Structure formats: structure tokens, C-alpha cells
Amino acid sequence: MRIWLTLAFGLAFIFVSGAAWADDTEVATDLVKNLCSNCHGKDGRSVSPTFPNLAGQRKEYIEAQIKLFRERTRADPHAQAYMWGMASNPKLTDKVIADIATYYSNQPVAPGRSPDDAALSERGKKLYSMGDSTRNIPACVMCHGEKGEGFNTIPVIPRLAGQHKEYLEKQLQAFQSNLRENALMHQITSGLTPEDIDAISTYLASL
């Protein structure tokens, strides 16, 4: 009798756990389709530079950022205006967040946009690849990869290639002003001029 009770409880646990997993997956799918896509576009390809492309972004980075939005510890203006409210949804459990991040990371990346100013893009490439030792500006490539694809051994470092130029500019400005708090990025961007930010963003958007 005891064996049968143990077996019954075990099967019930498996059934409930499986149902919960299915529910989380369904919630994530629903949120992606009916909420996230309104700003980030179908399959994570945003049509507005206000909102970043998520297609092909690093899973761990997406997951970490949604949790920062949920905790209201990422405080740049766009985070507050859009994502604080979205991330307060009680359905956004850690499992649902992980499922959303997995979905977007598996989508084909958005293609880069040909730069309007080739010389500006070339300047951005030089700064991205080599930095500027005379101004204590390190090369972005050391963390974000040769082609802006992110750094394999540190998965929370984001992919930058093919991102909207305007979005990249705003994020670099936010790091520089400390509206988006990140001690390392604040230090790295502190020496950038508006022209540097324009050039680097133009280059990355073209990849």
C-alpha cells in the first residue's frame, strides 16, 4: 500500500510540474506575440529605433535586462517610460523571462543598414576596433567581439551588430551621463565626444 501511495504522489508531482512548465511556456508565447511584439516587432525585429532589435540577442543579456526592469534598477528614461510598467506584469516569473529570452535569442538577426556616411562609419570602425589611447578610450572589440556579436565567455555582454543607430546612441549617452548605471560603461564612455558616439553607432548599425 505504501509503495502505491508513493508512486501515486510521484506521478501527481510529475503531472503538476509538467502542467506548470507548459503554462509558463504558453504565457511566454502569449506575451511575445501580444505584448512584446507591439514595440519590438515580429520575431524581435523592431521597426522603430526607439525600441531595440531583440532578434539574435544574447539570451543571458535579455534575461538579465528584463529582471533589471522588473526590479526597477535599470533607470534610463526609456526603461522607466516603457519597460518598468511592462515588467511589472505578475506573469513575468523567472521561468517565463527565460523562455522569452530563449525565443528571441533563437531568431535570425536583423541585417545591418548601409551607412549614409561611409567616412563616419569608417571612423567608428577604427574607434570600435582600436580605441584611442591618447584619450584613454579602450577598444570596444575587447568585450563586444570583432563584429559586435558579443563575447562568448561572458554571455551577459550584448550583441551590438545590426542594432538601430539611434538606439545605440541613446544608450551610450545614458551610460556616459550615468542615467543608465554601469560603472565600467560609464568609465569607458566618459571620454567619448558626441561625434565619437555618432561614428561608433553608425558603424555598429551597419554590421
Image: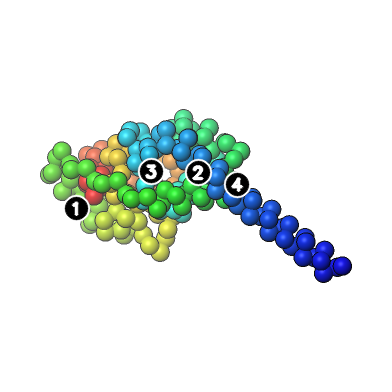
**Most foreground residue, 91 or 189:** 91
Tell me the quarter of the image containing the N terminus.
bottom right
User: Residue 15: x and y, percent?
Assistant: 68, 56
Placement of 155 over or under 42, stated as above or below: below
Q: Residues within 10 Å of mark 4 (few under 14, many from 20)?
A: few
**Gap between marks 4 and 1, in whole Å?**
48 Å
Look at mark 3 in the image and give the residue it sits on.
Answer: 43
Amino acid type at mark 2:
Thr
Is disc 4 in contact with disc 3, using a CB cutoff of under 8 Å?
no
Mark before the other along the chain sequence, 4 or 3: 4
Is disc 2 in contact with disc 3, using a CB cutoff of under 8 Å?
no
Is disc 1 in contact with disc 3, using a CB cutoff of under 8 Å?
no
Amino acid type at mark 4:
Asp
In the rendered view, does 193 fall on the left or right side of 52?
left
Placement of 51 over or under 123, stated as above or below: above
User: Residue 29 got which mark?
Assistant: 2
In the rendered view, does 97 fall on the left or right side of 8?
left
**Gap between marks 2 and 3, in whole Å?**
11 Å
**Gap between marks 1 and 3, in whole Å?**
32 Å
Find the residue positioned furthest to the top.
Answer: 81
Figure quadrant of residue 145: bottom left
Mark before the other along the chain sequence, 4 or 2: 4
Q: Residues within 10 Å of mark 1 (few under 14, many from 20)?
A: some
Mark before the other along the chain sequence, 4 or 1: 4
Look at mark 4 in the image and give the residue it sits on.
Answer: 23
Q: Nearer the viewer, mark 1 or mark 3?
A: 3
Mark before the other along the chain sequence, 2 or 3: 2
Mark 2: secondary structure: helix
Look at mark 1 in the image and give the residue it sits on.
Answer: 126
